Every structure is written in structure tokens, then in C-alpha cells.
Image (tube, helix red, strand yellow):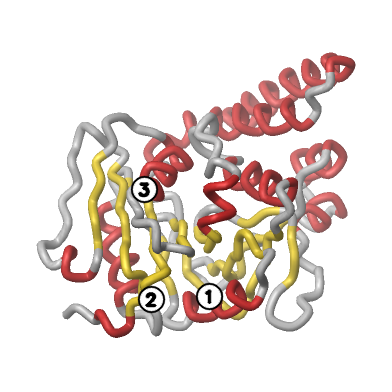
Amino acid sequence: MSRESDADPALAAVTVSYRSEAALAELLESLTAGVVRPAVTVVVDNDPAASLRLDERSADSGIRLVHARDNLGYGGGINLGVAQLPPEIEWVLITNPDVRVEASALATLLDVARREPTAGALGPRILEPDGRVYPSARELPSLRTGIGHALFANVWPANPWTRRYRGENRATSGQWRETGWLSGSCLLVRRAAFDAIGGFDDGYFMYFEDVDLGARLSRAGWRNLYVPGASVVHTGAHSTRTAAESMRAEHHRSAYRYLSRKYSAWYLAPLRLGLRVALAARARLTRRG
């Protein structure tokens, strides 16, 4: 049943589906059932070979389906979805299709967003299906923390580089804390900020587009805020489980893209070469593992 009275006219949601029909139904149901629900929800179907179909009642709940002509990747798909939104939309929930948004989460995020005029992006607490908290609010990776995290995260999870990068022990003052970047699996963005920096860099097919977004928002004077009072559950990786090897390769490609652009000065060319070699070697090792 449609619940127009609960829709916030300034709020929209955008998600990207790639063979994610089973998970998508739960996401759309959770958005509709929330204390506050989006006035518009755009679902971008990123699989041109198998056109997605939605329930015929979807239009009554403000749900719109957009078919991409090619697989645009996550950031490119989100950009396409945001471009479909009417001009009165001020806030956009960007979310994976395999997320369940808890009833009060959007209301909590919007409350903080409207009280913090320099907030460009706000991220909820993201829970695993077993209740564990996923470290979704992290510091921007530097060369030192990136190398330490990459080398030791799997064999020594409590190493200082990983703890610094993930920011898991940082205190939250009041309702939120500032962070370097927020997981793109679920975050609320101020549309004016998102549009001003050109949205996601769609040169990242998958992975690191959220790191890059957080960095560019910060450079433009916006803040990334972690709001743990808002919670979502992320069941995870429905569209990538069957392509694990190619996704690992994509992760390392995106890591190089981000770091090579961060350390782009001409005199850092040897560093970029070293990064390329090290990431290629790590990709081979994780593939064997």
C-alpha cells in the first residue's frame, strides 16, 4: 500500500542492480516501511542482457526503473540514477541493493544532515547479517597505512596500520564523528555537494569510488560524517560472488588508480611504478590463496 504521507519530498534513493533481484526486493520493502521514506527511488539495472522487472505496484511507491545500455559499474550506475531525479530532491540515499534499511535510519541521517550545513555525506552504522559492525567509516589511505593494512590485515588484524585506517577505536562525540570516507554500500549525500564535484568518478568500475568521493568532498570543503545512531544491515556481494577472481583484479586496479592519482607528481614516477608492481604481485598472491 502506498504511504504518500510518510514520503519526504526532498529525499530520494538510488541503487544499482546487477542480477540482484532477490536482494533488491528486501531493500525496496525496507525503504517503503521506514519512518521516513524517499519520495522517489531509482533502480538502475546495470545488466543489459537481462532486463529487470519490478512489481507493478512499484510506481505507486515512487519507484522508477532505469535500464542502462551497458554495465556502467557501481559509480557510473549511481550517477545515471541521480541524473534522473527531479530538481527538488536535496538528499540522496545511495545504497547497494543487498541492504536492509532499519526503520528509523533515514530519519536519523536526515536530522543530522539538516543540522550540519557542511555535511556532504553521512554514513550509517553498517551491520553484517550476524550483527557484527562493519568498519564503514575510515581514514583516507596514505601510503604508510595502505601498505601496512595491505600486508598485515589478514595475518595480524589488530595491527596499528589497520586500526588507524579503519578508525574503529575513534570516539563518537554526540550523534556523529567526522571521517575521511564512508562506505558506498550505503550513505546519504547532499545533492548539491554531490553534483558540485561531479558525482562519482566513473573511471572506477568498482571499488575505491567511495574513497575517491570522500576525498573530493573533503577537498571541496564538505565533511563526511559517520552517524552510528542510524543502522542498516548489509548482506553483501550478491552481484560479485560468481566473479570473485575478476573482482579481485578490479579491486587492485582501482587501488592503483586512486593511489597513483594521489601521488601524481612527476618526481613520484618511481613510486607509482613500485605501487603498480606491488599491487600486481598482491593480486597474484590473493588469487592463489
Q: CA distance from mark 3 to mark 2?
A: 18 Å
Pinpoint residue 51: horizontal percent, then vertical percent.
18, 41
The image position of residue 111, as x and y in percent, is 56, 80
Q: Is residue 170 left or right of residue 128?
A: right
Q: Earlier in the sequence, mark 1 or mark 3?
A: 3
Along the polypeptide, which appears first: circle 1 or circle 2?
A: 2
Residue hosting label 2: 8
Q: Is residue 19 above or below residue 68?
A: below
Residue 154 seen: no
Secondary structure at badge 2 equals strand
Q: Is residue 146 above or below residue 59?
A: above
Res 149 quadrant in image: top right
Q: Which residue is mark 1?
A: 110
Residue 39 horizontal/vertical position (percent): 32, 69
- Residue depicted at 64% across the width and 78% down the height: 115
Question: Could you tell me the amino acid type at mark 3?
Answer: Gly
Q: Is residue 27 visible?
A: yes
At label 2, which amino acid type do we have?
Asp
Q: Residue at x 35, y 32 (%)?
A: 71
Indicate the position of residue 257 as horizontal and vertical percent values. 65, 28
Q: CA distance from mark 1 to mark 2?
A: 10 Å
Dots 1, 2 in contact, CB < 8 A: yes
Q: Which residue is mark 3?
A: 81
* Residue reaching furthest to the left: 56
- Looking at the image, which is closer to me, 132 or 44? 44
Residue at 42% x, 46% y is 78
* Badge 2: residue crowd in 10 Å (few <14, some 14–19, many ≥20): some
| In the rendered image, the vertical position of residue 182 relative to residue 129, given as above or below | above
